[in-house]
Image (spheres, grey):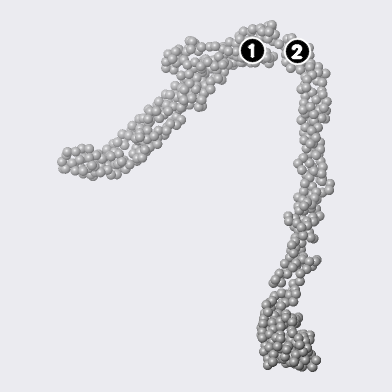
Amino acid sequence: FGRRNLFCFLSNWLNKFGIETIFRRNFQTEVSPGRCIFGTESTPVLGTDSFSIQQHARLRLPLNFTWPGAFSLDIEAWDSKADFLISSFSIRGKLEIGSEWSQDVQIGRQTELRYSYRIICKDNYYGDTCSKYCAERDDRFGHYTCKPDGEIDCLPGWKGHYCEEPICLEGCNENNGNCTVPGECKCRKGWQGLFCDVCKLHPSCKHGTCKEPWQCTCKEGWGGIFCDQDLNYCTHHKPCVNGATCMNTGEGSYTCACLPGFSGVNCDSEVRECESEPCLNGGHCLDSENGYTCVCPKGFEGPLCEHKVLTCVDRPCFHGGTCTERDNGLSYTCECPAGYTGLNCEKKMDKCTSLQCANGGHCVVHGSLRLCSCRSGFTGLRCEINIDECARNPCANASTCIDRINGYTCTCAPGYTGRHCDRPTNHCASQFCLNGGTCTRGPMGKPACICPTSYSGPQCQYGGQSSANTPSPNKALESNEKLNVVAIGSSVGLVAVVVFLCLALVLVRNMTQRKSKEQDSKTMNNISKADFQKENLISAAELKNTNKKIDLDENPCALPYFDSFAQKLGGNNNKSCNILKHSAGKYMIGP
């Protein structure tokens, strides 16, 4: 508590008596006789006969308890020598803790006292009752200052209830590292790196990695407990030389697959293959990087000079081929007869080899002729043309025809149905009744007409008759029903006749085709088994060096049997013979 000033006239009044004046201040909850509960505080001697009270002089009374809010204040002026009470004043009220001063005036018979008072918390105490304690500190027990409300405010780099925990380096792994001062990151055992996020390998680990401390997970190509065994020795060391292929066998070992002409563990030793004299019939051996080469004497050939060179003297041409010498008798050529090819005319020509039939067609040989037998729905020299079944306009009533392979489909216009769109979906939609007749559903779902007066007939097509002669609608329906029965019977009979005729035609056609195939089979297979083997089987010794081709030139249109074949095709010889010459010297005959 403090006092601001006392009036000067109080001191002047006291000076008249030559009194040494002091002020005494007492505090308690309620004004009552006896000692004050809160405490008592006195000033020193302020003056004698003549003195003035200093401005801003304060009296402080410390309180060691929680401020209750209500108070009583006694102010007394005493003569310090005679212990004489000069004047006294008492007040009571309520006062909140704060830095603002409360002012008051007390007037007595001979004195007037003006004073100010307040209650504030001691240092390190906060709150409405000064009951919250907070003392700033920066030591091992905490690092903080105090907020105006007494709450702890941590210094930079510290955290925790009493700011005793340091904040580690940003990014430091909280599981693998810690710190004792702010901004530090000290790694625990088994971890390393700036942020303690890198595990330490086992000290003996050579080529491995880890996810946890002291692990040793081998990298690709390495094995063993400590990853010190090279499993990919070939890639890391490349031990094989001279083009050899290296193969890992595990645990740091390998094998080399040497190219011809080399040997040794690493294929580093050159093999001299001519030392074994591999060349026959006096051939000369020459060593090379990839092996050796035999230089053959005159009259021999082959990799080892093992084959004798055939000449026309050896009669190498088969099937009546003509032999012609070349290179001064060191080689020859065979001119093959028709139907044979090969270096020695040993191959019988397949006439269908060069005729490629499209769309599933297959080649058929008739003597020297080759034809393509097409699948149903295709035509052309090579069966390359799809027959357009829509060309004959099979779809009725403005429907759309879509061509298929060996068939077609009709997309019907509205009001029509059926394979050819020839049946109306609504019989009355086709204006069945004439002359204003009304179409209705008759027996068996067929349309029937109810005719107006003076008209009659199934479709009201008869007119000009009297009403007496006009049949009633019921009679018209009965007549229509009879006509329908007759029509149905006729239709069934007609369908039966058509089916019978179709079966007869199919039977005749199958018999004709079977006879034709039997004749072709006899023509194609008229060579006896013994003759076939005689012409086509040649010993291995006779087939040496047979890899040449010949050209044949044959005009099948000039053959005597072509006239009859042309008649089968439906034309004369010149128009029906369509010849395409190809590389083998044969011709393809097509329609």
Q: For this view, does 128 lie left or right of residue 509?
A: right
Q: Nearer the viewer, residue 259 or 303?
A: 259
Q: x%, y% of residue 59?
A: 75, 82
Q: Nearer the viewer, residue 160 or 142?
A: 142
Give the structural element (helix, strand or loop) at label 1. Answer: loop
At horizontal 71% and vertical 69% (from top left) the residue drawn is: 147
Position of 417 relative to 530 (above/below): below
Q: Tags 1 and 2 in contact by the CB under 8 Å rule?
A: no
At horizontal 79% and vertical 39% (from top left) the residue drawn is: 231
- Alpha carbon separation for disc pair 1 and 2: 23 Å
Q: x%, y% of residue 248?
A: 78, 35
Q: Residues within 10 Å of mark 2 (few under 14, many from 20)?
A: many
Q: Amino acid at mark 1?
A: Asn
Q: Nearer the viewer, residue 341 or 8?
A: 8
Q: For this view, does 367 lie left or right of residue 88?
A: left
Q: Amino acid at mark 2?
A: Cys
Position of 452 relative to 283 (above/below): below
From the image, tell me which residue sits under label 2: 296
Residue 344: give its label.
1
At horizontal 75% and vertical 55% (from top left) the residue drawn is: 172
Q: Residues within 10 Å of mark 1 (few under 14, many from 20)?
A: many
Give the structural element (helix, strand or loop) at label 2. Answer: loop
Nearest-to-viewer mark from 1 and 2: 2
Q: For this view, does 346 lie left or right of residue 150?
A: left
At horizontal 78% and vertical 59% (from top left) the residue drawn is: 179
Mark earlier in primary sequence (1, 2):
2
Q: Nearer the viewer, residue 51 or 579?
A: 51
Q: x%, y% of residue 257?
A: 78, 29
Residue 408: give its label.
none
Q: x%, y% of residue 546?
A: 66, 14
User: Is any atom of residue 444 visible in this view?
Assistant: no
